[in-house]
Amino acid sequence: MSIRQFKDIPREKLELSRPLRKYSIIGDVLSYLLCPRQYGYFKVRNIVPSAQGQLFFGEVIHNVLDRVHLHYRKTNENQSNSLPTENEIDQYFDIVSKALKSQGIRPLSKSLEQRARKLIKQFVFTFGHTLFPRVKDTEHKLQIQTSLDNGLDYILHGVVDVLFYNYEDGNISNEKVEIWDYKGGRIPDEQYLKNYEFQMLVYSFLFKQKNGFYPEENVLFFIGEMDRESNLGLSAEELLDRCTVKVKIDEQKIKHAMKKFEEAVEKIEDEYNRPFDKQWLAPKVKPPETMCATCDIRWSCENPNGKFELSGL
Ligand code: SF4
């Protein structure tokens, strides 16, 4: 008997349920919009990049500052309100750096690792006394289950670096909060700054879903600005002004950002439904040249920044 004899037997169509996917603004939507190919290879197909130098710099700063905030909170509970010493910051840095390296996330160079260490200390000793007493929460998780216009459910999530109580007439206001996001680099050009503003608008939306009200202010703090030559020797107040970009809470802009977010999620979902060799293609719009120059899959890429030569051994 041939198997072909069974082909006309009526059978129920097997409906496979689609997994409920999680999307974040930084790790998914912005990564995908910058380069669908890189997103598909490294995030979706889980290919591990060989070197993650850019990632090291940002991660080490975030993780050490998180420990510094915890340190301050603990001493605050003991009513000693003290900043960590230089030695303690070095210890936190060494622990975090070791953990990142064990995951294959290494600095691009020793000097960049040292720069990250110096910037953290500069941040803590310049702003710690004024900023840390205002911390309400760190690594504040935001998450909702929602759906696209076409009915597809998904989880939208994000983590806010720090929530600060707002200052009002020189006093801390316990009702009003500010969302702060630390960036390891310097203030980027307008095109990339728009991406960060997009991130903060999505966080504002998520924050309201969780807390019932919008934050009072959204602040991006660019830690890499602190050692810019033109910023050396400034007072703490002036330096704070040079390192921060505020994103206005504007309901129309938030609506627009959420529409853009959902359109991107829809595009990502469409990618999953394409044949394997038609998924995750290089973008038509140029990603930053430095991104392509350090990309592990540049050799086989039809990218808009042009072909990269194979490196000789
Ligand atoms: S080389 Fe550039 S365009 Fe190609 S995958 Fe890498 S980042 Fe994307």
Image: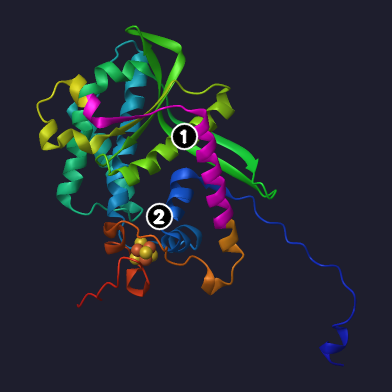
Q: From this viewpoint, which residue is outermost toward the bottom? A: 1
Name the amino acid, label 1. Leu
Residue 259 is one of the magenta-drawn residues:
yes
Outermost residue on the right side: it is 10
Which of the 4 image quadrants contains residue 242?
top left
Q: Residue furthest front?
A: 252
Closer to us: 114 or 195: 195
Q: Which mark is residue 34?
A: 2
Residue at position x 18%, y 53% from top? 109
Residue closest to the eye, 210 or 85: 210
Mark 1 lies within 8 Å of ligand 1 (Cβ measured): no
Q: Which mark is residue 201?
A: 1
On whether ligand 1 comes within 8 Å of the CB at mark 2, the answer is yes
Q: Main secondary structure of the magenta part?
A: helix
Q: Is residue 281 above or below residue 128?
A: below
Q: Quarter of the picture for ligand 1? A: bottom left
The residue positioned 30% from the left and 35% from the top of the image is: 64
Residue under the image location 37 percent in, 71 percent down: 301
Disc tally is 2
- Give the quarter of the image for residue 68: top left
The image quadrant where one finds the C terminus is bottom left
Secondary structure state at the residue bearing disc 1: helix
Disc 2 marks which amino acid? Leu
Query: Residues under labels 2 and 1: Cα distance?
Result: 18 Å
Q: Which mark is residue 182?
A: none
Residue 148 in view of the camera: yes
Q: Residue at x 14, y 37 (%)?
A: 228
- Extent of the magenta region: 240-268
| Location of the N terminus (image quadrant) | bottom right
Answer with mark 2 or mark 1, whichever residue precedes in sequence. 2
